[in-house]
Amino acid sequence: KRVAILLSGGGSNMRALVTSMTGEHPARPALVLSNRADAGGIAWAKAQGIATEVVDHRPHGSDRAAFEAEIDARLRPYAIDIICLAGFMRVLTAGFVTPWQGRMINIHPSLLPKYRGLHTHARALEAGDQEAGCTVHEVTAELDEGPILGQARVPVLATDTPDTLAERVLVQEHILYPAVLRRFAQGNRAPLYLP
Ligand code: GRF
């Protein structure tokens, strides 16, 4: 299976995914695509010899369809089987998502269905939650919806700030996402619950 990873930032999840795809793994990283040329993840992927593409959203303004058509055009030559969203900070609309449904997954830093969207850790702290975590799910046209493929939980500590909580969750993201991708590439969609 040929995997494209879409990101906007540092790409620590992308790195975890890429380094997991060796040996007997049923998938390989075929492309890393970013909407930002300066994303740290792009430099790292290039240094690994992985193909990269940058599709800047800004020239398209509010025309999401045009932005998504450009992403689609860039993906095509790589014959991608699976898309992993890994900190890709642009909302994808039904026009892009629907054709990929069942072949596109995302990691979100909350225990969905809690806290869709942004600022998940601050919201978990405000709510007084005792635990937090991350979710890998299939991408559907609704933001941060779609069948859950895996979750990992962490405790919330009394001293936590959004940053310290994010750090603890991120450690689990790097374990959960590769584990779920491996299963997904084998056609296993049964949810995985860690630890
Ligand atoms: C992660 O917390 C991910 O869950 C969220 O964006 C962040 C991306 O981090 N969607 P990185 O770029 O993978 O380091």
Image: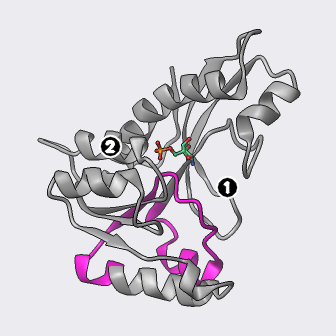
* Mark 2 Cα shell of 10 Å, populated few (<14), some (14-19), many (≥20): some
Report if the CB atoms under discs 2 and 1 are less than 8 Å apart.
Answer: no
Which region is colored magenta? 75-104
- The colour scheme applied to this rendered structure is one colour
Single out the residue that lies furthest toward the right.
Answer: 127
Q: Is residue 58 above or below residue 11?
A: below
Q: Name the residue that disc number 1 marks.
A: 144
Q: Is residue 90 above or below residue 72?
A: above
Q: Residue at x 47, y 52 (%)?
A: 9
Question: As rendered, which of 149 and 124 lies closer to the eye?
Answer: 124
Single out the residue that lies furthest toward the front.
Answer: 38
SS at badge 2? helix
Looking at the picture, how far across and down is residue 37, in whole percent?
40, 66
Q: Residue at x 64, y 57 (%)?
A: 146
Label 2 CB, ligand 1: below 8 Å?
Answer: yes
Question: As rendered, which of 37 and 67 lies closer to the eye?
Answer: 37
